Image (cartoon, rainbow, N blue to C red):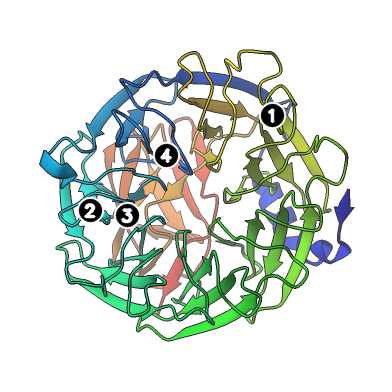
Amino acid sequence: MTTLSTWKKAGAIFLLFAAMGIAAKAQTFNSLVSFDGTDGSEPEYVTLVQGWDGNLYGTTSNAGGAGSVFKITRDGLLTSLYSFCSQPKCVDGEYALPGLALGTNGNLYGTTAEGGANGLGTIFEVTQTGSLTTIYSFCVQPGCPDGSFPNGGLVQAANGTLYGTTAGGGANGLGTVFRISKAGALTTLHSFEGSDGSSPAATLVETNDGDFLGTALKGGVGSDGTVFKITPGGKLTTLHNFGSGGGPYPWAPLIQLRDGNFYGTLNGGPSGGGTIYRITPSGVFTALYYFCQQSGCPDGSDVVAPLDLGTDGNLYGTTVTGGNLTCFGGCGTVFNFASTGKLTTLYRFCPEAGCIDGFSPTGGLFQATNGLFYGTTTLGGAGRDGTIFVLDMGLGPFVAFVRNSGKVGQTGGILGQGFTGTTSVSLNGTPASFTVVSDTFIKATVPPGATTGFVTVVTPSGTLTSNVPFRVLP
């Protein structure tokens, strides 16, 4: 297997995060839910998200043929909240692929790849009780200058506006980057031309400097996709063209770590099995690990999901195929990747015929604030319609944010558990005023004199620390 020593340059950041977490015990894998079609089917490319109530939310691509929004408690109680195409001509959308974004108002936002008033995709808002509002239908004019087929998810920026991409439409028919208000006012920021990429399929990530980084699945100089940066005003810069060493097809969103660099995955590489890579803000690309360097791909193959940074300092992810060969081409894996460049396969799906545990995990892992990792498989399970699973690495609870940045005086949300009776909240050592809304949600105000750093919450059962720093904006 191939690893590159340049990964070690980023080791300090991972060691810092590792100091925050509890040492990992032997991992434990359990299937929580098997979809059966009536409650959802085929959760494809979805990474779960935690709501204000402490529950996890996601989407399926095929429930009654059109997809659904669901809620699941951390111990596995599944509730189907909304089924798409419930309205005539599917004006409410169909085929929700990438999952949901938690808004600062507690509601969830997402996209459907098809359906809507014009049949070419929607943007929607859904409450935690399942009340759905379609806030935009794409292709309002002939030729779809506003875009079509929004295969990627949404991100809510520090300014409160939602940003996303479409895989088609725009001035050149090759996809767009857009922003949209919660009231449904959409602005096309960029129409791809081909040389700068085309067909973006991944959710954008807001950078520490307030810009956005994304990937285009196709186009660019090498015709195998690009990494691009775009300002909130729409100025796009191509940072990297794939097809010249790292491997093509960047399906997955990027993640920015405290070293300032971005990390992601590719569904290609020298062996065709996939790649983990790093790219600097200036566009310097480094391949860190190549999958499928051994016969049968025991470490996995076909990487389309994003990486998640665990509180132990490791990056966690999934592969769609490889691992156990019970399925044709392999059933998929769960892995973590350390700062030393070592990849560890944590679980191989479908160890026995029947695949009750699921197979083909196309979505990423999500570490909830209880310390456990949750994920989905697109296929398999008792109902053969996919599963939701949980991975316990022995890591302790922590707190997370609805938004991890804000200005002095702004009020933001803190996610966690055991908040009833909280006695203090502080940002990098500076006390903050706060209100305990529920046992799983706190509202806190960025205090005067605060600087960027970790948030600590003192609860009756102990002190919880955020998994990432909170960034104080000027």
Q: Position of residue 452 (x, y in %)?
A: 50, 68
Label 1 and label 2: CA atoms lie apart by 34 Å
The secondary element bearing badge 1 is classed as: loop
Residue 328: mark: 1
C-alpha separation, residue under disc 3 versus residue under disc 2? 41 Å
Tell me the CA gap for discs 1 and 4. 40 Å
Which residue type does callout 3 highlight? Answer: Ala
The residue carrying mark 3 is 444
Q: Residues within 10 Å of mark 1 (few under 14, many from 20)?
A: few
N-term mark: 4 or 2: 2
- Please tell me whether mark 3 sits on a helix, a strand or a loop: strand
Residue 416's label in the rendered image is: 4
Distance (Cα) linking label 4 and label 3:
13 Å
> What is the distance, in whole Å, between disc 3 and disc 1 at their CAs?
50 Å
Q: Residues within 10 Å of mark 2 (few under 14, many from 20)?
A: many
Tell me if mark 3 has few (under 14), some (14-19) or many (20+) residues whose alpha carbon lies within 10 angstroms of its own: many
Q: Is mark 2 on a helix, strand or loop?
A: loop
The answer to which of marks 1 and 4 sits earlier in the sequence is: 1
Q: Mark 2 points at which residue?
A: 119
**Spot occupied by residue 215 in the image (x, y as percentages of width and height):** 53, 67
Q: Which one is in front in this view, the residue at disc 1 or the one at disc 4?
A: 1
- Tell me, yes or no, if residue 450 can be seen here: no
Three-letter code for the amino acid on which mark 4 is drawn: Gly
